[in-house]
Image (tube, grey):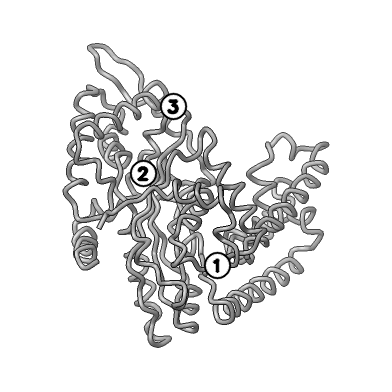
Amino acid sequence: MNNWINARHCSDRVFQRPSLLTGLINKDMIRWAGRFHALGKLPGMISNVHVSGYDRLPLREQPAPILSFSHKKLHDVFTIVDYMAGRPLDRFHEPTIVAMAGLFDGFYAYRDLLPDILKMAPLRPAAVLLGRSLGRSIRSIFESLNAHPVYRDGSDIPTREQYESAQYSGRSLTGMNYDDFLRRAAKETLNSVVAVQRELAEKNRTFLILPEGRYLHDGQVAEFRDFVGVMAFRKKRALALCGISYDEFCPDALGRVEAWVHTMSPLAPPESRSAIPTFLNEARDCLQSAAPLLATHAIAAALKPLLDGREFLLDDVQLAANEHMQRFAAALLPKDPALQEEARRAERWRSFLRARQSQWMEACAGNRWRLRLSSIDRFARTERSVNDILWNYNCVAHFWDESWRSRAMTRAAGE
């Protein structure tokens, strides 16, 4: 339990000597994964990727598992590249992936990568051309990674009003009316499901799914969709669950955060169709419990009561955060093991103050402080539906809920 290794170091070795992967994955995948690996080191990205549980993955000659990662933020792409590249070579199955179809057709590139000013007349035609070009490039990259598009209601499939709107520009991006787009989306999704099943059976690839079925914007792990259970049942593949956490409030001097990924013992596939709902409920429970406990979550818990605008002393907040970190360290759950050390707890607090104090806090009389709620309310609304404090608090909901914590600790004791 909690035997962590630095997967970044392992993936560095692989990308410095790509011949190590010859015969294990295709050359295009090695090339693109190496580029993502390098991008993940840039300022504002990831300082280290800590992984536990590699030894729970099956050996290469055994049936490859389905790998399901919790979804947290854009950084997941870089974290998962290092996770996958850092696997021991004797447990290295080539992946096949289903990904959000909006990445393939330019929807997300147009929505998230282009500034709103470009989407206004008379610049909109140029923005559409750029969105299409970015979409084609992203599709090419993902296809080289054995990725297949899956359209999800409410995300990759917009409403008719959204599709026809100038802001979304669905018709301009795809060249299709809404009904034709729906028919193409259904066909592509079906083709993806068939392709993934064939690759699992014929090439013993590991099926990597991100997010875990759908993305819950309040920070917790969402309920799984039937697709994962049906795939596990049909192909008799175990489900390996990988919980991701980021020490988001405690970046280094370059604004990079530590990523932590805990791999749980794989769940055996459901034995019948009627067992799929129970299987999916257990999978969601396990994946939530796999999210490692970090200093950020303790600091979020200490700040949460202060969102009502009350004044506070910094020493009191540090004391509360320190107490939560000590509780984390004592829990039989995935966590940053160094939180048991006073020096680590103090260093994490200093990193938080350096990164967030001037942004989130305003000074009051008598050495007291108040949270600057207007600043805290500015968060990535494409990723989250609550502010960063509540989102990080919710990421470890399994610790705050007594019943959930009991189940999680019982499960962890058996690993």
The picture places residue 219, in percent across and down from the top left corner, at 40, 50
Q: Which amino acid, mark 1?
A: Glu
Counting residues from the start of the chain, the first of labels 2 and 3 encountered is 3
State the separation of the CA atoms marked 1 and 2. Answer: 32 Å
Q: Give x and y (percent) for residue 281.
A: 35, 71
Q: Amino acid at mark 3?
A: Ala
Element assignment for label 2:
helix
Q: Is residue 200 above or below residue 350?
A: below
Which residue type carries mark 2? Asn
Q: Is residue 254 above or below residue 177?
A: above
From the viewer's perspective, is 86 left or right of 183?
A: left
Q: Identify the residue position indicated by label 3 in the image.
A: 253
Sequence-wise, the earlier of marks 1 and 3 is 1
Dividing the picture into quadrants, the one containing residue 411 is bottom left
Label of residue 94 in the image: 1
Q: Tell me the CA gap for discs 2 and 3.
A: 21 Å
Kindly identify which residue carries mark 2.
392
Horizontal relation, residue 120 to residue 31: left or right: right
**Residue 235 in picture, x, y percent from top left:** 49, 82
